[in-house]
């Protein structure tokens, strides 16, 4: 299985999440490739069995770079995906991510979200137990 993961991260939380996820998937002998939204080309993503998108909630929406990236995706019809959203307030933005990807006729396998604590600038505000929650997400991909 090959997984391509695309993320955007201001303080490192989403980066930490995709790195952990990649390690977990590699334990199952999967091939993984991690790209930021700046590095990845939305009209020519590398071939994969499953795509993972991971980004924060910002300004009461999905973070802007990820939103634009998803809007610009092309050629993803029928491709499988998982989505991850981090958020400081109670509401997550998974629904927004799903809506954007359903417009591309992609097929959802799994979703998960992580609330971050107050000290977001530390890059260490993921709440205890996040690895266990992420491992459960990995099992569904
Ligand atoms: C400019 C800014 C705006 C934010 N707006 C929201 C918001 O509207 N809702 C929310 O739940 N969290 C908000 N947050 C918290 C982010 O979701 C949090 O910083 C992010 O999940 C951390 O992940 P990252 O380090 O990978 O960027 C905001 C953070 C910043 C810096």
Image (cartoon, rainbow, N blue to C red):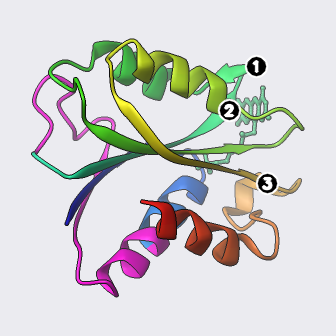
- Tell me which residue sits at (81%, 75%) in the image: 128
- Tell me which residue sits at (61%, 25%) in the image: 62
Of residues 20 and 124, the one nearer the viewer is: 20
Which span of residues is magenta-colored?
Answer: 20-46
According to the picture, the residue beneath numbered tag 3 turns out to be 116
The correct choice, above or below, for 91 with respect to 12 in the image is above
Q: Are marks 1 and 3 in contact (CB under 8 Å)?
A: no
Q: Are marks 2 and 1 in contact (CB under 8 Å)?
A: yes
Asked if ligand 1 lies within 8 A of label 3, the reply is yes
> Is residue 25 in the magenta section?
yes
Q: In the image, residue 4 lies at what x, y percent?
A: 25, 53
Of residues 70 and 139, the one nearer the viewer is: 139
> Is residue 13 in the magenta section?
no
Q: How many marks?
A: 3
According to the picture, the residue beneath numbered tag 1 turns out to be 60
Q: Which mark is residue 57?
A: 2
């Amino acid at each position: 299985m090959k997984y391509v993961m695309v993320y955007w991260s201001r303080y490192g939380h989403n980066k930490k999440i995709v790195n952990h996820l990649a390690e977990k998937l590699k334990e199952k002998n999967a091939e993984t490739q991690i790209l930021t939204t700046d590095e990845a080309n939305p009209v020519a993503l590398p071939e994969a069995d499953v795509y993972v998108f991971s980004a924060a909630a910002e300004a009461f929406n999905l973070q802007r770079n990820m939103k634009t990236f998803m809007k610009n995706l092309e050629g993803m019809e029928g491709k499988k995906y998982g989505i991850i959203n981090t958020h400081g307030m109670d509401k997550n933005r998974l629904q927004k991510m799903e809506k954007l990807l359903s417009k591309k006729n992609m097929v959802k396998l799994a979703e998960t979200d992580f609330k971050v604590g107050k000290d977001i600038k530390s890059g260490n505000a993921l709440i205890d137990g996040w690895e266990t929650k992420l491992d459960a997400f990995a099992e569904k991909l």
